[in-house]
Image (cartoon, rainbow, N blue to C red):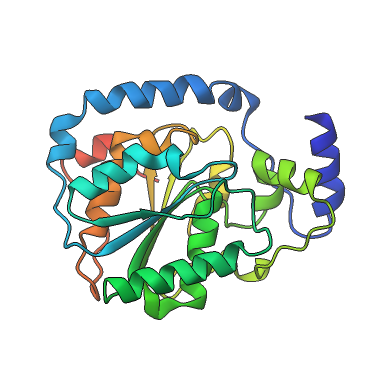
Amino acid sequence: MASVDAAASTTFQDIERYVPPPNPLLALTEAHRAVAEVISLSLSRKMLARAPRGDGHPVMVLPGFLGADGYNAAFRRYLTRLDYAVHGWGQGRNLGPKDGVLEGLEARINYLSERYEGPVSLVGHSLGGIFARELARQFPERVRQVISLGSPFGEGRMTASYPARLYMALNPMDELPIDEDELHIPPPVPTTAIYSRGDGIVNWRTTLQEDGHHQSQSIRVRGSHCGMTLNPAIWFLVAERLAVPHGEWRPFERSSWRSLLYPAS
């Protein structure tokens, strides 16, 4: 990891303010905590069954760095059972903004919005959330809403994320085909940023939506980074957000039992 840190520091010191990655202890316990979240799914069936039903509109789920559609298959099946038309991102393994990826995603949301005759909701984990926000920024008429899960779009993101450090160490000369100066600005559609202070991969401060518009909100959950697409509290939260009628907005309310699962920021 030392060589990655050195490459990252020399690459980004002059680009943006430095934000450290998460505590190494959080990173070391990521796998164990993700397994605990998988186990908790079977204990949360009653809560998950109470989630609001969908209206059949299309939803595309985008994986994080090094992930693929298979990684979030269980999450997509759950949303499908709630009557959404759920699709993966269809780009294979997420290796970052390589040539053709953004063009492929553009073609995919164009296809889905035309097939279902309406805009697509985008749910992105980590780097997948960055892609989702960028798609909504470029094609707001085709995107219904964006939900990011632990996505580092805030200032300092390139030093605050272990995957970002790894990517730039392996691709030191690559120019990202995304306007990095606008990443922290929410796209012009309803936008929800889900984050965890227990994130062991990305510094949680870079996953918060600050200075957003009136249809943007950050919601805190408990859990790991790698287990976000297997976290029952996130499953329920995403279902609740997707159920907001098209063209409307209501912030998520932490009333009653919800305050136990969704702590105050």
The residue lying at 54 percent from left, 21 percent from top is 29
Residue 210 visible in the current orientation: no
Side (left or right) of 55 relative to 182: left
Figure check: 90 above or below 221: below
Query: In which image quadrant can residue 60 be found?
Result: bottom left
Front-lying residue, 116 or 152:
116
Residue 156 image offset from top left, x and y in percent: 67, 53
Figure check: 131 above or below 95: below
Side (left or right) of 178 relative to 249: right
Residue 57 image offset from top left, x and y in percent: 24, 65
Residue 234 image offset from top left, x and y in percent: 33, 42
The residue lying at 83 percent from left, 51 percent from top is 172
Residue 7 visible in the current orientation: yes
Residue 148 image offset from top left, x and y in percent: 44, 54
Figure check: 205 above or below 15: above
The residue lying at 51 percent from left, 53 percent from top is 128
Side (left or right) of 165 relative to 146: right
Quadrant placement of the N terminus: top right
The residue lying at 87 percent from left, 48 percent from top is 10
Number of marks in the rendered image: 0
